[in-house]
Image (cartoon, rainbow, N blue to C red):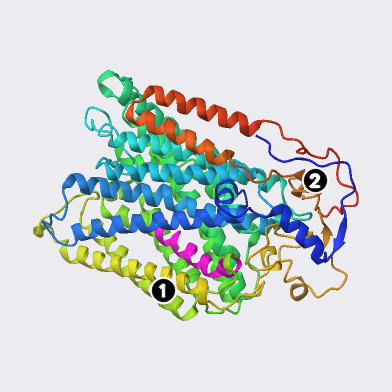
């Protein structure tokens, strides 16, 4: 699947501040063609990143509307705003949307847009694979939501436990939408993760060694590596259950010796690392952006980077803590409980690093800073409630109660949405060239922060009072009425805060203050180029000498210390070219010829969509045609192209910086 290949044997030109003619040539080489063809064929990582952000945010709004409907149903006792069947579909699709269609894709949007800019490259390692990951994400999301229009949406929770999800107890196609939709989405996640890993390993600026990577890069890379191991587990589980439902196999059916708990093992082998994949890149956003507003580098960079990797490694060893109440042997309970508690240590390191950065810096109270500071508090609350469920006796009391619902919302909303909104305030000038409004932004923050805590903190109390999760209604004698009403009011206040953000974005796109290249006086490479960036990102590829290339003069006044070179470097203007460097020290290795815009990812997605829809409706001949179309699209994609290849030796004249 290698897409980058070799340039001719020529000496690359090293220039300083290229002139207008050179910039115009680079623009022609890298630009996306206007019109429908450009929309379908573009492989520009910046356009793909924006598409990810907008699409994921649309799914966030859809999931939020589902949540508001759920909260209206639970605002008081004995309410019947919807049928139990509709309620099951709503809370299932709410979970599926927030877990699969919003949380990770929105972080992929940030990383797709920012990685090449942060790493000093002109594109991701596999541009066409990048486009494919987006198109499949969009198609799989539409596939899942199409189930609503026929009244057959998934209805067994985002975890889809058997035996209720088996054909015996859920005979309709609801679960089939879920199973095929997750397999479809898993393709997007897998190819996107491969792209991130290879991009990190190969397409960095000279001198961008691993000890100089932004924490966002560490977070996304760690999540991507984890996804390559975790996603196959849930895809396999979905495939096996689909075979049970369609062809009568008995992999999960206890009547024929199939263990239902096997589903839980396979699902949580994926599910728990997935939760960290939704958190670690968001933590990276805070670790990279918060120091800008504190006017100092992140405290404990090395420990935070190592803690990011350690968190994901531990995350693969604690999946059974979701199953403490299923009859796990005592010895296993002891080890897995210990691991579930130990995993809090690297997260605590990050918390102390953020607090120390704020305490030793000179904070500038922008809207972005408020979101990041609020995130730290929510991170602590969500972390403590998760730490509690790592204890087996406590977990036995709390499992399947609203306490767990409160915990997961503090983790997946508080630790994901708040950094995402803060990150959008921070990088919106880079994306659009305009600033988001600060006055409306403060209203946005306080409304979301108060609404979030008002909506989700009382769930801890209702859980301790014994309210089960996933219930349709409850009686007035249970004593949960007031707290549920407060939760509903808080949820609507939080939703209003999200609406204020949408209004701020809409207004700022046309009326926002024009931003310069570096309106925040930030330290990382993406702020060294215009806002928004040109199609080619960097006119000349920079050479990096520190973690903070734009703050070197203020952090180290020694004139004899090496400095990053941002205005002088490789031009690489003979077609779509970028540099490849060695894995650890980022020493120049080869010149890569990158592929241009291509319709192949789009048509491959169309063929896959036909295949999955046909499998859903049991149209086996159409499924065969879809499979044939898929194979044909892959063959066309992989057909050799003239001019793509890679130089076998290191380019002459390129300085090697460790």
Q: SS class of the residue under badge 2? A: strand
User: Would you say 411 lies left or right of 94 here?
Assistant: right
Nearest the camera: 268 or 302?
268
Secondary structure category for the residue under label 1: helix
Name the side, left or right, on which 444 lies relative to 574: left
Which residue is painted at 27% across and 49% down in the image? 90
328 to the left or right of 345: left
Distance from Cα at disc 1 to Cα at disc 2 = 46 Å
- How would you rate the neighbour count of disc 2 (Cα within 10 Å): few for under 14, some for 14-19, many for 20 or more? many
Is there a contact, CB below 8 Å, between mark 1 and mark 2?
Answer: no
Residue 499 % position (x, y): 37, 68
Q: Please say whether residue 42 is one of the residues in the magenta stretch.
A: no
Residue 93 visible here: yes
User: Is residue 332 in view?
Assistant: no
The mark nearer the N terminus, 1 or 2, is 1
Instruction: Depth check: give the residue in front, 363 or 189.
Output: 189
Magenta span of residues = 412-430
Image point (24%, 57%), residue name: 69
- The residue drawn where x is 44% and y is 50% is 341
Q: Is residue 260 above or below residue 193?
A: above
Quadrant in the picture for the N terminus: top right
Residues packed near mark 1 inside 10 Å, few (<14), some (14 to 19) or many (20 plus): many
Q: Is residue 420 magenta?
A: yes
Tell me which secondary structure the magenta stretch mostly adopts.
helix
Position of residue 53 relative to residue 576, above or below, is below
Q: Which residue is mark 1?
A: 444
Residue on which the image places disc 2 = 591
On the image, the x and y values in percent for residue 403 come to 29, 55
Viewer-closest of 427 and 201? 427
């Amino acid at each position: 699947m290698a897409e980058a290949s070799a340039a001719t044997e020529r000496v690359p030109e090293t220039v300083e501040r290229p002139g207008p003619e050179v910039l115009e040539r680079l623009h022609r080489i890298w630009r996306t063609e206007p019109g429908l063809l450009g929309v379908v064929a573009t492989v520009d990582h910046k356009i793909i990143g924006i598409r990810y952000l907008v699409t994921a945010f649309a799914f966030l709004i859809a999931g939020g509307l589902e949540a508001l409907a759920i909260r209206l149903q639970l605002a008081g006792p004995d309410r019947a705003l919807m049928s139990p069947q509709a309620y099951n579909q709503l809370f299932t699709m709410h979970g599926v949307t927030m877990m699969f269609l919003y949380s990770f894709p929105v972080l992929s949007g940030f990383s797709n847009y920012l990685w090449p800019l942060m790493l000093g490259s002109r594109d991701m390692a596999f541009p066409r694979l990048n486009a494919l990951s987006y198109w499949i994400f969009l198609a799989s999301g539409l596939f899942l939501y199409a189930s609503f229009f026929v009244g057959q949406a998934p209805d067994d929770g985002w975890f889809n436990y058997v035996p209720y999800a088996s054909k015996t107890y859920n005979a309709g196609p609801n679960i089939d939408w879920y199973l095929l939709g997750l397999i479809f989405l898993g393709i997007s996640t897998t190819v996107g993760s491969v792209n991130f890993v290879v991009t990190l390993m190969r397409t960095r600026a000279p001198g961008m060694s691993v000890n100089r990577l932004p924490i966002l890069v560490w977070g996304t890379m760690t999540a991507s590596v984890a996804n390559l191991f975790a996603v196959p587990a849930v895809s396999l589980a979905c495939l096996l259950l689909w075979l049970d439902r369609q062809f009568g196999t008995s992999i999960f059916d206890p009547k024929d010796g199939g263990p239902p708990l096997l589903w839980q093992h396979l699902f949580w082998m994926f599910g728990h690392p997935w939760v960290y994949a939704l958190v670690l890149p968001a933590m990276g956003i805070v670790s990279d952006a918060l120091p800008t507003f504190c006017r100092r580098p992140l405290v404990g960079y090395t420990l935070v980077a190592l803690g990011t990797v350690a968190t994901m490694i531990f995350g693969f060893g604690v999946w059974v803590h979701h199953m403490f109440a299923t009859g796990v042997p005592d010895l296993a309970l002891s080890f897995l409980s210990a691991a579930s508690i130990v995993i809090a240590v690297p997260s605590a390191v990050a918390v102390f690093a953020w607090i120390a950065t704020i305490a030793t810096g000179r904070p500038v109270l922008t809207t972005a800073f408020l979101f990041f500071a609020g995130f730290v508090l929510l991170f602590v609350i969500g972390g403590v409630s998760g730490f509690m469920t790592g204890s087996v006796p406590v977990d036995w009391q709390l499992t399947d109660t609203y306490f767990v619902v409160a915990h997961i919302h503090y983790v997946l909303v508080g630790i994901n949405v708040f950094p995402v909104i803060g990150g959008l305030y921070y990088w919106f000038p880079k994306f659009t060239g305009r600033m988001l409004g600060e006055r409306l932004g403060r209203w946005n923050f306080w409304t979301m922060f108060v609404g979030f805590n008002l909506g989700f903190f009382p769930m801890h109390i209702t859980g301790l009072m014994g309210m089960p999760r996933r219930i349709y209604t409850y009686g007035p004698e249970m004593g949960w009425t007031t707290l549920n009403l407060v939760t509903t009011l808080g949820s609507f206040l939080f939703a209003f805060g999200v609406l204020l953000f949408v209004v701020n974005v809409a207004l700022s796109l046309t009326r926002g203050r024009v931003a310069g290249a570096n309106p925040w006086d930030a330290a990382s490479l993406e702020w060294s180029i215009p806002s928004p960036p040109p199609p080619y990102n960097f006119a000349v590829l920079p050479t990096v000498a520190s973690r903070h290339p734009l703050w070197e003069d203020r952090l180290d006044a020694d004139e004899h210390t090496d400095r990053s070179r941002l205005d002088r470097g490789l031009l690489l203007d003979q077609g779509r070219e970028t540099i490849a460097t060695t894995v650890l020290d980022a020493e120049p290795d080869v010149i890569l010829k990158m592929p241009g815009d291509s319709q192949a990812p789009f048509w491959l997605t169309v063929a896959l969509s036909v295949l999955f829809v046909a499998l859903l409706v049991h149209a086996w001949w159409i499924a065969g045609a879809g499979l044939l179309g898929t194979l044909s699209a892959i063959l066309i994609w992989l057909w050799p192209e003239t001019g793509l290849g890679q130089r076998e030796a290191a380019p002459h004249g390129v300085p090697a910086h460790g």
